[in-house]
Amino acid sequence: MAWLHLCAPCVEVRGAYERVDAAARALAAASDEHRSIAQIRADVAADLLLHGDVHDAPAEEHDSNSGRHDTLGTQSARDSRAVRTPAVSRGSRRPAGRYSRFRPTVRVTVPALTLLGRSEEPAVLEGYGPIPTAVAEDLAASAPSFLRILTHPETGTVVSVGRSSYAVPADLRRLVQLRDVRCRFPGCERGADRCDIDHTRSWEHGGQTSLDNLACLCRGHHRLKHQTSWQVSRPPGTGAALVWTSPLGRTVRDSPDPPF
């Protein structure tokens, strides 16, 4: 046995670890898997470093004596795999290997004022710590494999994850509920804590998961918005106000209760 150490930029190392960990946890779920999660991570990392990726394991690569699935397979399989190239899907240059579906999810929390150049508060790479602002700006602007998280400059509450995630983070959900208090359909008094969190501009039409594009809707009015000809919008410059348009063209404006 031996150790292999890697010293590289933190964002790359974190992304590599997330990919290895995701693959290892998927393998660990198998009923006949007896290795520890750390052992599986080591095997997955070795597979990726030695072969770039590996094909789905053939039946002969299962160790029938121990009942344990070895990610590197038997010795003969390892020897043959070392000299073959990864399979490539038709119409794609991406290897169709066992780990090709695992992609890292790296979260970078960036204070909103830092991106605007009005604060020197550092960004934070989850699982690592503070990273240079220049690196955070590059990731926030263009890196599709990183989840950009914008936080409130005073409270640190998440106010946007942009188009990186459809799911609403817990603290952003709480902020929307605190702001709205109730269902945002005019006249509905269903409490916000019993409502769905709805993207005012639908996700499939480019809407972002951000405070200014989310609103509380009870299940009935959520369905009304999506399954009937009622329409809702948030005109620029109106803050958190929503404008509902009925099927007959009548408009009704709804604003959250004070203090928001």
Image (tube, grey):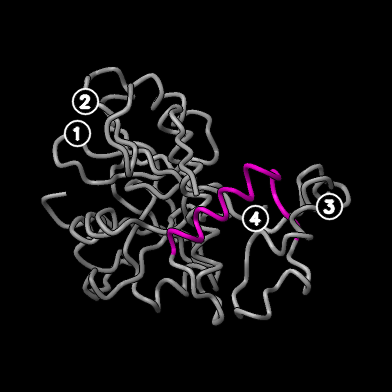
Query: As shown in the figure, which amino acid type bears the numbered disc 1?
Result: Pro
Residue 225, position in %: x, y? 47, 68
Residue at which label 1 appears: 153
Query: As shown in the figure, which amino acid type bears the numbered disc 2?
Result: Glu
Q: Which residue shows up at 28% across the image and 59% down it?
A: 170
| Front-most of residues 149 and 70 | 70
SS at mark 2 in the image: loop
Q: Which marked residue is nearer to the observer: mark 1 or mark 4?
A: 4
SS at mark 4 in the image: loop
Any magenta on residue 52? yes
Residue at which label 4 appears: 99
Between the residue at mark 3 and the residue at mark 4, the CA separation in whole angstroms equals 14 Å
Q: Which mark is residue 121?
A: 2
Q: Which marked residue is nearer to the observer: mark 2 or mark 1?
A: 2
Label 3: how many Cα within 10 Å (few below 14, some 14–19, many 20+): few
Residue at which label 3 appears: 89
Residue 127, position in %: x, y? 32, 44
Q: Which marked residue is nearer to the observer: mark 3 or mark 2?
A: 3
The answer to whether residue 134 is above or below residue 77 is above
- Please indicate, yes or no, whether residue 64 appears anywhere in the rendered image: yes
Label 4: how many Cα within 10 Å (few below 14, some 14–19, many 20+): many
Label 2: how many Cα within 10 Å (few below 14, some 14–19, many 20+): some
Main SS, magenta region, reads helix
Residue 82, position in %: x, y? 77, 47
